[in-house]
Amino acid sequence: MDLYKLTAHQLKELYHSKKISSAETVDSIMSRIDSVEKNVKAFVLVNRNAKDQAKTLDGNGRLAGIPVLVKDNICVKDEETTCASKILEGFKPPYDATVVLKLKKEGALLLGKSNMDEFAFGSSCETSCYGPTKNPWNLDTIPGGSSGGSAAAVAADETILAIGSDTGGSIRQPAALCGVVGMKPTYGRVSRYGLIAFASSLDQIGPITKDVHDAALLMNVIAGYDPYDSTSADLPVPDYTKSLVKNVKGLKIGIPKEYFIDGMDKEVEKYVWDAIKLLKSLGAEYEEVSLPHTDYAVSCYYIIGPSEASSNLARFDGVQYGRRSKGANSIIEMYINTRSEGFGDEAKRRIVLGTYALSSGYYEAYYLRAMKVRTKIKEDFDKVFKKYDCIITPTSPSAAFKIGEKSDDPLAMYLSDIFTISANLSGMPAISVPCGFTKSGLPIGLQILGKPFDEELLFRVAYTYEQRTDWHNWKPKL
């Protein structure tokens, strides 16, 4: 039996019945990594001590013996955490992120760190200082970003579970392009403590998994209030696995006309509509709705995101941690040289954009106006959710594109997140599940958006759809 192919819930059953051990699972995973990682390049760090850790487990945790891969912008104590940037090379956090503490408490085996776009700036996993990750379905294409390493590793069976972060679609878009499940929880549902910030009002940590059941299992562990995160919601966390029922009868679905646009890939449109019609055949109802401020979402995001990033990245100056340029004659020269050498092109681009938007005389014209538009976008969703239970859209306007295809065109790259950005601006939860494949064999994702803190409904809809289709069982041939 190839244990690396199994899901977390399947492994848990085998552990419970004493048919296999977690050490055997780690052996299987490590063999898989050794076999395919040279092509996929999803990892920046592999924890070769995972098997030794497996032997010491008591088996009582909810994820006991389950391998989990963590994105490289989430702090793991004494383990190099670089955000895939030269400026943080050698940085080993003296503490664990809250989600990492929760994983450890529940017996998860941390496999290492996954590749990502530098500081989560990107939609293709090409801006990493370690080089690009490749899509397991076609090694000439991108896996999506910024959590491309996490999504690619799950798709390639190099891990059982993975953790990513989502600022404008960075969990859902790579999940869609790699044919796996990715959820962005409601803002505040999962602690951000220990997540190296990109845009603090948009960032959220979430699961990337092989199926919906595994996503619910992982959410059960990482969700919940954290006093170390001032934006954490002090609300009870339900058992998300109880939402895994095949029932959408009477469900009211909104289909926003602004998300079915000219230029969207026809194969994507076809499979998304096939999914909507399948849900209707199972008892759901759908109607066209309007989210009139959708056209402003990308512009709004690319003012707010870089503005917050320019503030957050000001701390990386070579003084306290990470890279420090040598040979400078003054502290100012050291600052300049360190940041010039340490940050990549996309990081510099976003710092400049954000600093400009926040500068004297432009704050009101750009950042303040973008915040007002953000409120309008949220109001659009609030209005729709008064009548509808959820909203369904494509996750991405196209399947994965070729590596390097959009590297020299930042605006084209930014439009890759056109369908995912609004969920971050409004703070709502959203999940992406596989819903088809293009003729060339690339995955297509279906996005389901819900009311704040109603992840339970998203799991129910996603699980109902998943159990009526076979897309999640498809595997790339590596």
Image: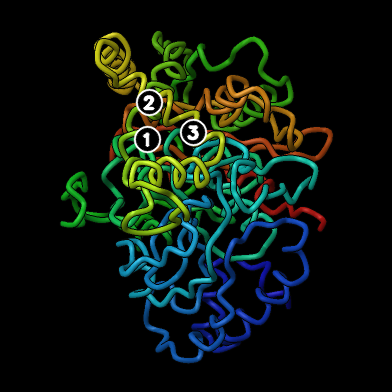
Mark 1 crowdedness (10 Å alpha carbons): few <14, some 14-19, many ≥20: many
Report the residue marked by disc 1.
309
**On residue 354, which mark appears?**
2
Q: Is residue 198 left or right of residue 272?
A: left
Residues at marks 2 and 1 touching, judged by CB atoms closer than 8 Å: yes
Mark 2 crowdedness (10 Å alpha carbons): few <14, some 14-19, many ≥20: many
Number of numbered callouts drawn? 3
Residue in front for this viewpoint, 78 or 434? 78
SS class of the residue under badge 1?
Answer: helix
Residue shown at the point (50%, 28%) measured from the top left = 349
Residue type at the position of mark 1: Ala
Residues at marks 3 and 2 touching, judged by CB atoms closer than 8 Å: no
Q: CA distance from mark 2 to mark 1?
A: 7 Å
Percent across and percent down for residue 430 are: 43, 37
Residue type at the position of mark 2: Gly
**On residue 276, which mark appears?**
none
Report the residue marked by disc 3.
348
Q: CA distance from mark 3 to mark 1?
A: 10 Å
| Image: 390 above or below 114 | above
Q: Is residue 106 left or right of residue 161?
A: left
Percent across and percent down for residue 256 are: 48, 16
Please state which of the two labelled residues, at mark 3 or mark 1, is closer to the viewer.
3
Residue 208 visible at all: yes
- When asked about the image quadrant of residue 339, the answer is top left
Residues at marks 3 and 1 touching, judged by CB atoms closer than 8 Å: no
Residue type at the position of mark 3: Lys
Residue shown at the point (42%, 42%) measured from the top left = 184
Look at the image and name its color scheme.
Answer: rainbow
Labels 2 and 1: the sequence-earlier one = 1
Q: CA distance from mark 3 to mark 2?
A: 10 Å
